[in-house]
Amino acid sequence: MEALWLSLRLAACTAVILLLIGMPLAYWLAQTRWRGKFLAESVVALPLVLPPTVLGFYLLVAMGANGPIGKLWVALFGHTLAFTFFGLVVASVLYSLPFAVQPLVAAFESVDGRLLDAAAVLGAGRWRTFREIILPLSVPGVITAAVLSFSHTLGEFGVVLMVGGNMPGITRTVSIDIYDHVQSLEYGAANRMAIALLLISFAVLSTIYAVNRRVWSPWPVKRGE
Amino acid sequence: MRLHFERPAPGNHTPFELDVDFRIGRGITILFGPSGAGKSTLLDCIAGLLKPHSGRVALGQRVLQDSSTGSCLPPQERKIAYLFQAPTLFPHMTVEQNAGFGVADLATEERKAAVYYLLEVFGVAHLARRKPGQISGGEAQRVALARALAPSPRAVLLDEPLKGLDAELKSSIVDDLRAWNRANWLPILYVTHQRDEVDALGESVIALDGGRVVSKGVPFAVLDAPRTRRLAHAAGFENYLRAAVLELREADGVMRARLSGSDAELELPLGYAAVGDHVHVAIRAGDIMLATQRPSGISARNILEGTIDSVEVRGATVVCRVNAGAMFFVHVTPGALRSLEIVAGKRVWLVIKTHSCQLLEE
């Protein structure tokens, strides 16, 4: 089941990267008073409404041999970014961005501002306040962000197909594999993979929800909840 | 300090403006004023959480903020303790961790010593391992005090810290704070809108209303001679009247005025007014006496005839509403209620001393 293993690796990498870049971005969004904040929020939310094929198309063009990012990549690494695992990771990160950033922003914003004031007056700088006050009080939001980005990436199809090129072992994720089997009328194989994916996803989610009972249901963005 | 701060208000309301200029010394200074006077805003500016639009705030020799030079110390560096109305403890940390938050840069031994010393002073050391969710409001506020004082601040700001606590709790916290300050002798600015706290702590008082310092001095001068209506209300004056000046008698230090809407005349302390001007007067309900016969041979200069409109017993105080040309609130004791047989509809006379009448500015 190398397709399944590939999908899990992709989802895990994406979730980790999204937490790393999502947190600074979410922190900035939560505390900035810039009047153009709505623009940044819209950009982050785009993947929620864009058809996957649109995103996939633009990413393919940018990452392909003739695109700006692709050319840079070839110059640095000698091969194209498109049709590689890393290319998939990049695409997944962009595609699942709002699923990580929005729960993080909501969690950070729900921390009582007076707690932050108290920390400041007691001498804590921004970084210390983030580490010791905001983050511990936002754990459910962080977990939600991780779970949502993982699950969302696991289920990707359109973007992955366009950017990845469906190469077995490298970019053939389990969702594409199922599609292939169905196209070749191999329903048995398709069914086996689908059930495997369903069970794994369910197991991951159940564990997370059981362990952290304050995780919200997966509707993104309920500000101030 | 001297500062000017403006906050635009939502909608069409005029922006809130804070414009103050005062100095405070060591010991407890009370900042008194009604809600919305700007007290919390002022404290936020002093602590560095809000930046005033212009002005200068200095603590001793250290300039905390000066708009003329553009300098502004962030709150982290001001070394000022600030206690909010609600304890605002960090909910995910124990009492001990909360109290030690401001002194995390000390070595473990020193930090523990400092923290436990203060927790003991405020009587909450036995709660060290508990979390904020497991202690009462009064205990939480004491922990907050210990937390704020642990980093050896140079000044202390307290924003109505005893709100919602019962009287016994309040006085014990006040005693502990006083004792602590005798040892440390810092400037403490204590905000409240409650009269009883002023009397309990009463060293010097600054009265704030509508964003401006209205008066300052010892509690008696500030609270028993309020200058604005809202301040009077906060200080417990139940009666507000409007009167037109009829005559000034400078030799006697009084003026005569007619109560608006009636023929009754009052003798008021002499103020800055001309004949024909309207003045506003505040009188404490407890300063008015009731008589069931017109008194004679009495020193009080104001004797107004009226009728009892309603009587309400509130514990040890009886509140009578009397219609004597204007509606007056009068406080008497339950004993007086019985012996004078005060009931609604009874004809009475109000007796008010000239100097019980406080002239207001607006």
Image: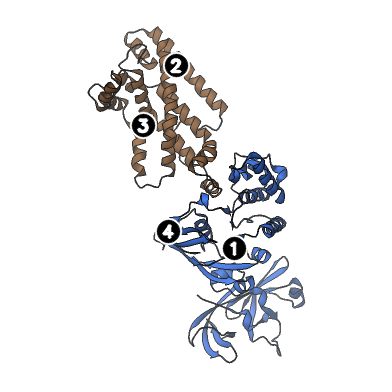
Residues at badges 2 and 3 in contact (C-beta under 8 Å)? no
Q: What residue type is labelled 3?
A: Leu
Marker disc for residue B193: 1
- Amino acid carrying label 1: it is His
* Marks 3 and 4 belong to one chain: no
Rounded to the nearest angstrom, the CA distance separating label 3 from label 4 is: 36 Å
The disc, 2 or 3, on the residue closer to the chain's N-terminal end is 3
For the residues labelled 1 and 4, the Cα–Cα distance comes to 23 Å
**Dot 4: chain letter:** B
Amino acid at circle 4: Ala
Q: The brown chain is which one?
A: A
Please check whether the numbered discs 1 and 4 fall on a single chain.
yes
Measured Cα–Cα span from mark 2 to mark 3:
23 Å
Chain B: drawing colour: blue
- Which element carries disc 4, helix, strand or loop? loop
Q: Are marks 3 and 1 in contact (CB under 8 Å)?
A: no
Q: Is mark 3 on a helix, strand or loop?
A: helix
Q: Residues within 10 Å of mark 4 (few under 14, many from 20)?
A: few
Q: Which chain carries label 1?
A: B
Mark 3 lies on residue = A48
Q: Nearer the viewer, residue B154 or A93?
A: B154
Give the CA separation, mark 4 to mark 2: 55 Å
